[in-house]
Amino acid sequence: MALFAAARRAAASSVPILLRASASSGSHRSAALHRPLAAAVARPKPRSMPFSSAPATRPSSDAELLSVIDSEIKYAEDCDDHDRVEEIPDNFPFKISDEKGTNVVTLKRTYQGEQIEVVAHMPSLVTGDEPDHDRDGEDEGEDKEGDDNEEDEGQKPEQSSVPLTVTISKGDGPVLEFTCTAYPDEVLINSLSVTQPSGDDEHDMIAYGGPDFNDLDENLQRAFHKYLELRGISPMTTNFLHEYMINKDSREYLLWLRKLKDYFKQ
């Protein structure tokens, strides 16, 4: 009995301890469960990043480039050439085809059953302005001035010129092709070839192009110059082409600048 009573007392005395332990453990678990929630509530919420459809800021280099392009456009617009309308001579024998954005002008005509086409390319301009270069041997150059003047006396001064390609055909027969250089008052023939249209690009590519025109007999050279002049490749035509192509070069340059500006404004 004494042992049983002692056991009961021990058991009875342990119940409050277990209850307290249980209650303490429960309170700790409850506190542990609530701490993350409290921390979550107390933690500042991240700011939302709203979606924007606005483009990214343009790099400063683009802005600087746009400014330079704008200045160049203004300068080009102030020039008289870009909006000048060429007056075509009354007896000009060719029909002019000039497509905006290209670097060539095409002239066409029919002459005694021949189809004549002249393709004029952008001019090679000579302004007379020489670039400034540092001359280390200036004194030495002055010593040779007399010799240079003697050499220059036998040379023609450089002039602006327009490259031409002239093709003359008769139906489906052979085609004459002249490559020329047009100066304001004369035309120089650089080469002459005879081709037979075959539709075979490889065959046309390796066809014999004829000798250097300057190697031909002088009488034959003069005869071909006369041949072209009768077909409209005359000083009147080349004078007009020279003026026309210089103005076209100004127009195309301004158009090119405006396209550049549109690109960098995107």
Image (spheres, rainbow, N blue to C red):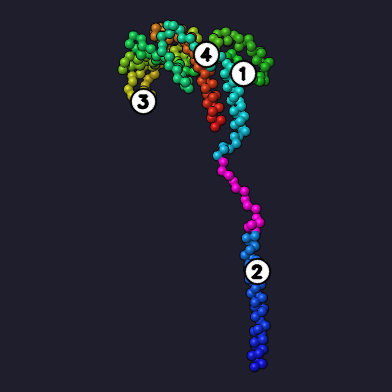
Q: Along the polypeptide, which appears first: circle 1 or circle 2?
A: 2
At mark 3, the secondary structure is: helix
Q: Along the polypeptide, which appears first: circle 2 or circle 3?
A: 2
Above or below, comparing residue 68 to residue 113 in the picture: below
Which residues are drawn in magenta? Answer: 39-52
Q: Is residue 194 left or right of residue 48?
A: left
Q: Which amino acid does the dot numbered 1 rest on?
A: Pro
Q: CA distance from mark 1 to mark 4?
A: 29 Å
Q: Residue at x 65, y 88 (%)?
A: 7
Classed neighbour count for the residue bearing mark 4: other residues with Cα under 10 Å, few (<14), some (14–19), many (≥20): few
Q: Which residue is mark 3?
A: 201
Closer to viewer: mark 2 or mark 3? 2
Q: Is residue 70 visible?
A: yes
Tell me whether the residue at label 4 lies in contact with that at label 2, contact meaning CB atoms closer than 8 angstroms: no
Q: CA distance from mark 4 to mark 3?
A: 40 Å
Question: Is-magenta flag for residue 21?
Answer: no
Q: Residue at x 53, y 16 (%)?
A: 82
Q: Which residue is mark 2?
A: 28
At mark 2, the secondary structure is: helix
Classed neighbour count for the residue bearing mark 3: other residues with Cα under 10 Å, few (<14), some (14–19), many (≥20): few
Q: Residue at x 43, y 14 (%)?
A: 96
Closer to viewer: mark 1 or mark 4? 4
Closer to viewer: mark 1 or mark 2? 2
Tell me whether the residue at label 1 lies in contact with that at label 2, contact meaning CB atoms closer than 8 angstroms: no
Q: Which is more toward the observer, 107 or 46?
A: 46
Picture coordinates of residue 80, whole percent (x, y): 56, 14
